[in-house]
Image (tube, rainbow, N blue to C red):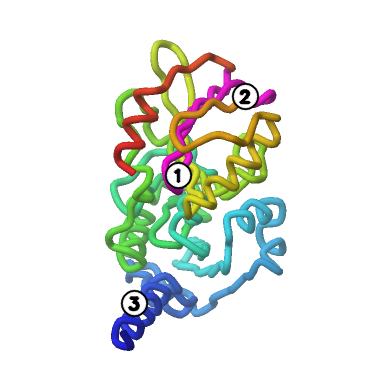
Amino acid sequence: MKFIIKGFILLCFSVQCALAQTPQELKSYLPAIPDWTISEKVEIFSPDNLFDRINGAAPLFIENNFREMTSMEYANADNYITIQAYRHATPEDAFGMYASERSPDLTFFPFAGEAQGDDSSVFFFAGNIYVKMWCSSSENISDILQSIAKGLSEKIDPKAGYPDILKKFPTEDKIVHSETYITSSYIGHEFLKCVYTAKYKKDGKSFQVFIVDGKTKEGAKEILDKYFTFTKQPLDYKEGKLLITDRYNGDIPVIWKNQYIIGIFSEDGNVITGDDFLTGISSKL
């Protein structure tokens, strides 16, 4: 038993270390680029002083469990490239922050968990790090930025990808690059935390499919108790198919299965019969 406990502790420690990149480690991950020099200057920001660097955007980062931002630079004779590496508590938080700033106007690149950018910027997530990069030049240096981003992302997490739960969502009718992770206050309810979502369009109707991770069966029931108390519905429900009559968000069909609450929400108020979606996801959890 002692060996099992010791092994478990070592495993947890190794996982924590794998996610806890220091500013020095992140700087060491930057690849060498011809004609560009990596600056010795490294700035570090915490939740207490992140406002000093990004001002109004700081609250959303903190909501996504931001822990530390490392700012680094490349420079050549005329220009510089700024790299801001935001370390979050978990890979889900880093993905959620990236997804909240994802833009349909940018080009997607085939590296990291997901990456996008344009002629002078690149954004990506890998592991528990969300990285934002841009160049002071107005010239197209996308190839250079992608080379830096690809090298950095592979050092952070060579197997980076979407959270596993999002892989349970149906691919049919899903809007590409619409997946998100929301830490709290989904559809306006503070108690709806740790929510994975994706947008769909079927038969001319747009809607979201979501999974709330209550961490335990008791945790999921506590969330449902709060929701049913808000909607003034009886609390004598059982695990399985349920209908939440949310006066602000319309009727929301859900399935409660163990620690998960799987549901469908229509932003347009359309009546969505989503049994196929819900049972399909439920069978995979």
Determine the CA span between mark 3 and mark 2.
44 Å
Q: Is residue 110 visible?
A: yes
Does residue 50 belong to the magenta stretch?
no
Residue 107 coordinates in the image, percent (x, y) = 38, 39
Q: Is residue 105 visible?
A: no
**Disc with the residue nearer the chain's start (1 vs 3):** 3
Mark closer to the observer (1, 3)? 1
Q: Which residue is mark 2?
A: 245
- Dominant secondary-structure state across the stretch colored magenta: strand
- Who is closer to the viewer here, 51 or 263? 263
Q: Which residue is mark 3?
A: 11
Pick out the residue farthest to the front.
Answer: 236
Q: Which quadrant is home to the C terminus?
A: top left
Is 202 situated above or below 63? Answer: above
Stretch of the chain drawn in magenta: 245-268
Q: Residue at x 54, y 44 (%)?
A: 100
Q: Residue at x 46, y 80 (%)?
A: 24
| Marking on residue 93 | none
Determine the CA span between mark 1 and mark 2.
19 Å
